[in-house]
């Protein structure tokens, strides 16, 4: 199997079970990754802006990809999305909604706010692994992303 | 008055009708009075004239009596000539029994035969005759008095009892007629003046007491009728019938407004309740999925990580957990599908039924072929006004049920059509296992299954969803079936589009509200 470089992923998910399932899916898909987990929207923003417990780059590196749940306590997923996509420093990081909701309203609102893709979590684990594989392959192999330097200089 | 100057023509307006009616009544009554008055006056004047003529006759008779007796006939003629000079006396003739004029106020007439009908009649019936007649071109009131042969006359005329002659006194009638005419003309003049004044007065009364308030009522009623503005009221303060009508009108409007508001509130509450319920179904089904995902995933993790540490029984339990979770997921998916049917927008369009059926068959093609089922589809299918995707769903569901519950050697399914007066009626008929009559209603309820799960799969949501879809189309769905023989599912679609158009708007509006809601 071809070796891909390690990617940094920020997973914003409040349900520890779901965190566990997602981590296991990445493992099963054999994706080399460093996964950081934020437990709600506020936690995610603190991580990205390196506030509170996340001071310093070592504690909170800039993620390559963000996986965002919608139904989150305190600050919701769509609020986080809105904040990221209006901030010049973060708007180029691919954000993917990872949620159980397949409501048209949620999907439309997310794309209106500039989400890069929207995945509904399959209930069956094997299907979820397939989805994660495709996700990783798409964003790290197929897609050409803007260079990091440019992002930082802005 | 621009008040009621709408489309009501001049002749059609209430005011004109009332004025014309009153004028007609006035003309008839006052006209009758004037006519009767005129007749009485004419008769009175006639009687006066007759009395006057009678007096003149007696005066003449007395005046000529003695000259006559004395045989002074020139004196008689002179008296008549003198009397004739009296104003109003036009004719003064003394005729003999043959009607020849012997003596006259106008000497030229002596010797002529009298033309007067009055004279002739008086001679004939031997009595005083009074009548209006034409005499030598002049209208006169003739008074002819016969002169009997009396004792004093026997000297000259003999003792025979006979009429000696007739005295005709004619008074001019034309001045009387003229007088009558003048009075009549004056009366007519005042009569017209009175009618005009009365009509004007009535018109003004009518305008302020009836026309203006009625116009106000009409405008307000029209406002309510056209714009449904039930908040408008009329301000009529008069304490009469119209005023009472205005008060009653206001009360009626107020009551209507109250009832409408209550209805609107009740409807809003119901809609909110319905929406709440739909949202509840939707949210609950979503929230159920999350823990379900945990159950499925973690039971798999246990099998993967600890599978070799478990005995067969333990593994079996885990498999049961997984399959239970799988079934739960299907139920939740059906719940979601159901809420989707009512929540999301309907798009109605006219589509050929044959296209819809073709589309539906694609869904079940595989199982049709697998079970080797003969499918008969009716010809000459109409175009129907419906939500195409959902109607495909209804057909596909009925077909898949027919296929699923098929137990015969020669399986056959028929899709038929019956053109009813006010609706299109379709049916899907099979010769499958059939349904007992007691379940014919129950099968349309959510999650109702009649068969064992092991034998026939599915959750029992399909028919309920089909029923919901038909409800949204203002149609009906029902089954006719006999156990062991087969089932026929009928459903109808109204032919009138209007009902569905209205429904469509409501659905769109509702979905706008849902769309605007934040989760």
Image (cartoon, coloured by chain):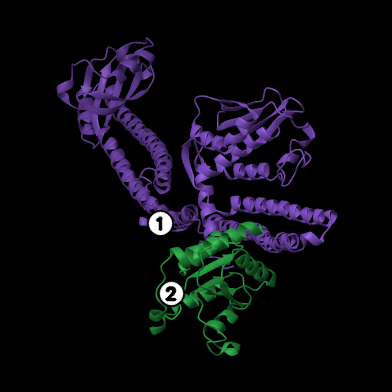
Q: Position of residue A25 (x, y in %)?
A: 62, 65
Residue shown at 39% from the left, 19% from the top:
B127
Q: Secondary structure at mark 2?
A: loop
Q: Which residue is mark 2?
A: A92
Q: Residues within 10 Å of mark 1 (few under 14, many from 20)?
A: few
Q: Which chain is mark 2 on?
A: A
Q: In the picture shown, does residue B311 fall above or below B31? A: below
Q: Closest to the observer: B9 or B323?
A: B323
Residue shown at 23% from the left, 36% from the top:
B86
Q: CA distance from mark 1 to mark 2?
A: 84 Å
Residue shown at 49% from the left, 54% from the top:
B221
- Do labels 1 and 2 touch, CB within 8 Å? no
Q: Which residue is mark 1?
A: B204
Relative to B170, B259 lies left or right: right
- Apparent colour of chain B: purple
Q: Closest to the observer: B353 or B129?
A: B353
Q: Position of residue A34 (x, y in %)?
A: 57, 76
């Amino acid at each position: 199997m071809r070796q891909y470089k390690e990617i940094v992923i920020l997973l914003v998910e409040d349900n520890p079970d779901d965190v566990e399932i997602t981590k296991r899916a990445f493992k099963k898909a054999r994706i080399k990754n460093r996964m950081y987990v934020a437990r709600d929207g506020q936690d995610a923003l603190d991580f990205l802006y390196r506030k509170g417990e996340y001071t310093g780059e070592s504690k909170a590196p800039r993620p390559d990809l963000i996986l965002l749940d919608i139904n989150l306590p305190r600050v919701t997923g769509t609020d986080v999305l809105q904040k990221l996509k209006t901030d010049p420093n973060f708007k180029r990081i691919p954000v993917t909604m990872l949620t159980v909701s397949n409501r048209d309203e949620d999907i439309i609102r997310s794309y209106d706010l500039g989400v890069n893709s929207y995945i509904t979590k399959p209930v069956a684990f094997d299907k979820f692994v397939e989805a994660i594989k495709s996700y990783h392959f798409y964003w790290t192999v197929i897609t050409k992303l803007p260079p990091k330097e440019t992002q930082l200089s802005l | 008055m621009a008040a009621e100057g709408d489309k009501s023509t001049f002749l059609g307006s209430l005011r004109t009708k009332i004025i014309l009616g009153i004028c007609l009544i006035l003309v008839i009554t006052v006209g009758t009075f004037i006519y009767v008055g005129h007749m009485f006056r004419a008769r009175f004047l006639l009687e006066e004239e007759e009395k006057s003529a009678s007096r003149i006759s007696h005066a003449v008779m007395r005046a000529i009596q003695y000259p006559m007796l004395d045989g002074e006939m020139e004196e008689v003629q002179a008296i008549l000539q003198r009397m004739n000079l009296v104003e109003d006396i036009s004719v003064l003739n003394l005729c003999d029994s043959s009607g020849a004029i012997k003596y006259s106020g106008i000497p030229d007439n002596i010797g002529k035969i009298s033309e007067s009908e009055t004279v002739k009649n008086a001679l004939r019936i031997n009595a005083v005759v009074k009548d209006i007649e034409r005499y030598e071109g002049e209208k006169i009131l003739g008074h002819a008095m016969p002169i009997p042969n009396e004792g004093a006359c026997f000297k000259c005329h003999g003792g025979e009892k006979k009429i000696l002659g007739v005295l005709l006194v004619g008074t001019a009638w034309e001045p009387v007629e003229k007088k009558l005419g003048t009075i009549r003309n004056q009366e007519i003049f005042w009569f017209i003046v009175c009618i005009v004044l009365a009509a004007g007065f009535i018109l003004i009364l009518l305008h302020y007491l009836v026309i203006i308030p009625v116009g106000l009522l009409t405008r307000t009623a029209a406002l309510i009728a056209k714009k449904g503005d039930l908040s408008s009221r009329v301000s009529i303060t008069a304490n009469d019938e119209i005023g009472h009508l205005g008060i009653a009108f206001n009360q009626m409007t107020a009551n209507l407004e109250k009832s409408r508001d209550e209805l609107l509130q009740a409807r809003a509450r119901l809609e909110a309740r319905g929406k709440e319920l739909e949202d509840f179904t939707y949210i609950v089904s979503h929230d159920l999925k999350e823990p379900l995902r945990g159950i499925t995933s973690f039971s798999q993790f246990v099998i993967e990580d600890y599978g070799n540490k478990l005995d067969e029984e333990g593994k079996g339990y885990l498999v049961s957990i997984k399959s239970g979770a799988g079934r739960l997921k299907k139920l939740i998916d059906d719940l979601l599908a159901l809420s989707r049917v009512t929540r999301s927008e309907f798009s109605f369009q006219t589509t050929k039924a044959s296209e819809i059926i073709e589309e539906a068959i694609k869904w079940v093609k595989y199982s049709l072929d697998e079970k080797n089922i003969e499918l008969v589809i009716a010809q000459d299918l109409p175009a129907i006004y419906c939500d195409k995707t959902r109607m495909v769903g209804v057909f596909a569901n009925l077909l898949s049920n027919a296929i699923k519950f098929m137990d015969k050697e020669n399986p056959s399914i028929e899709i038929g059509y019956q053109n009813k007066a006010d609706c299109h009626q379709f049916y899907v008929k099979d010769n499958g296992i059939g349904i007992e009559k007691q379940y014919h209603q129950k099968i349309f309820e959510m999650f109702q299954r009649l068969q064992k799960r092991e034998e026939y799969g599915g959750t029992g949501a399909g028919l309920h969803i089909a029923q919901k879809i038909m409800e949204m189309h203002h149609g009906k769905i029902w089954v006719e079936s006999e156990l062991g023989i087969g089932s026929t599912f009928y459903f109808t679609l109204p032919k009138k589009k209007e009902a569905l158009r209205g429904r469509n708007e409501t659905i769109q509006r509702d979905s706008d509200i849902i769309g605007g809601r934040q989760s």
